[in-house]
Image (cartoon, helix red, strand yellow):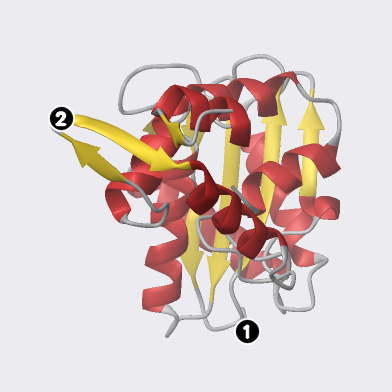
Amino acid sequence: MHEIMTIEEVSAYLRVSERTVYDWAQKGDLPGGKLGTTWRFKRVDVENWVNSRISKKPGAISGGVTSSATLTSERVVIIEEADKDTVLRKLVDLLAESPFVHNRDELLKGIFAREELMSTGIGFGVGVPHVRIDSVSDLVMAVAVCKTPIGGYSSLDNQPVQIVCMLAARSDQHAKYIRTLSAVSNQLKDAETRAAIIESDDPAFIHSHLIAE
């Protein structure tokens, strides 16, 4: 391995997409610099960065969609074929099993009321139904991955929805709620991440892709 690495080499070393490496570098998360218009990275800096990430305690992993408290592998479901209402009801039922959700019917009503305002299909084959209500005590998330496009789920780019991430939060959790919605959207814009999630039959594998980079 060269002492000075390119984006392509860092991508291969970290086993993530080149786009992810570029985004990390642009944000200043990954140590590196530009020589002219091209990003370059010192191998020792990249290795130290990886070691510092791996050594962190589980929980708030920088760059991931959320923490393992917000999303558990038990709240990841794989569905062969379904329509939008069926998927939304299934995710509401999963969230209702969480200790943070105290009224399943109120959650269901809130989710469907939000969908009536505008479909939460954000593009890239992803839907993010979400609601903030008083009967939720902390932010919680459930995920459905459908092997075939979900019937009746319209999207901003008219692409079929196959990954649905449902978020429910307490009414006053505006900042945390917005950050998590943004993180979900940004992470699932990566085509390789979406493909890996859709192809997987393992909820634990999907969970690991969503809570950490």
Residue at x 62% of width, y 58% of height: 108
Residue identified by numbered label 2: 37
Residue at x 57% of width, y 32% of height: 16
Secondary structure beneath dot 2 equals loop
Q: For residue 70, which quarter of the picture?
A: bottom right
Q: Amino acid at mark 2?
A: Thr
Tell me: residue 23, above or below residue 68.
above
Residue 68: tell me if it is visible. yes
Image side of residue 29 versus residue 76, left or right: left
Q: CA distance from mark 2 to mark 1?
A: 47 Å
Instruction: Say which mark, if any, is on residue 137.
Output: 1
Judging depth in this view, the residue of 178 and 41 nearest the camera is 41
Tell me: residue 169, above or below residue 15.
below
Q: Residues within 10 Å of mark 2 (few under 14, many from 20)?
A: few
Q: Residue 4 at x, y = what percent?
A: 42, 35
**Extreme-front residue of the structure:** 3
Q: Residues within 10 Å of mark 1 (few under 14, many from 20)?
A: some
Q: For residue 119, which quarter of the picture?
A: top left
Q: Count the marks: how many?
A: 2
Q: Residue 111 at x, y = what percent?
A: 52, 55
